[in-house]
Image (cartoon, rainbow, N blue to C red):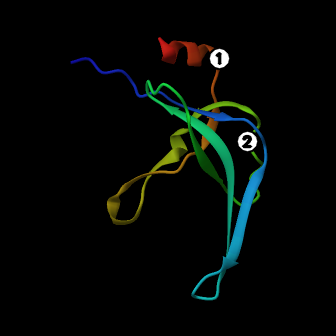
């Protein structure tokens, strides 16, 4: 059976950053910065809303289409495979190739 690479495309529509902060049970301050995105996974008929985490000081992603960067994938605690989206602009030519 021949398989095709999984196509995952993120779309950013605006640059608004959502921030939440507080104090943990250990009395340490925390802050979460996120941006709304729409993601189409594989051949899904429509995109789904999600939020992409932004690092401290990282600017918002500009409106446009993105793909996952290699640094989105890592091995976490207990040798678990983890994914945390780090987006890279999706080249127009690459988008058309992936769709075919």
Q: Is residue 1 left or right of 28 when viewed as pictured?
A: left
Q: Residue 2's x, y, as percent?
A: 26, 17
Residue in the foreground of this view, choosing between 95 and 69: 95
In the image as oriented, which residue stretches furthest toward the left?
1
- Vertical placement of residue 58 versus 93, above or below: below
Residue behind mark 1: 92
Q: Secondary structure at mark 2?
A: loop
Residue in the foreground of this view, choosing between 38 and 9: 38
Which residue is at a point 70% across and 72% down the rendered structure image? 21
Which residue is at a point 39% across and 25% down the rendered structure image? 5
Look at the image and tell me in which quarter the N terminus lies.
Answer: top left
Residue behind mark 2: 61
- Vertical placement of residue 75 versus 38, above or below: below
Corner quadrant of residue 96: top right
Q: Residues within 10 Å of mark 2 (few under 14, many from 20)?
A: many
Q: Are marks 1 and 2 in contact (CB under 8 Å)?
A: no
Q: Is residue 74 left or right of 23 when viewed as pictured?
A: left
């Amino acid at each position: 059976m021949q398989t095709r690479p999984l196509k995952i495309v993120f779309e950013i529509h605006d640059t608004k950053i959502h921030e939440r902060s507080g104090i943990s049970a250990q009395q340490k301050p925390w802050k979460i910065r996120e941006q709304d995105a729409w993601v189409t996974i594989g051949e899904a008929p429509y995109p789904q809303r999600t939020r992409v985490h932004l690092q401290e000081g990282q600017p918002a992603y500009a409106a446009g289409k993105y793909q996952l960067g290699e640094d989105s994938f890592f091995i976490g605690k207990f040798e678990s495979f983890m994914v945390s989206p780090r987006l890279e602009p999706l080249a127009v030519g690459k988008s058309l190739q992936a769709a075919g």
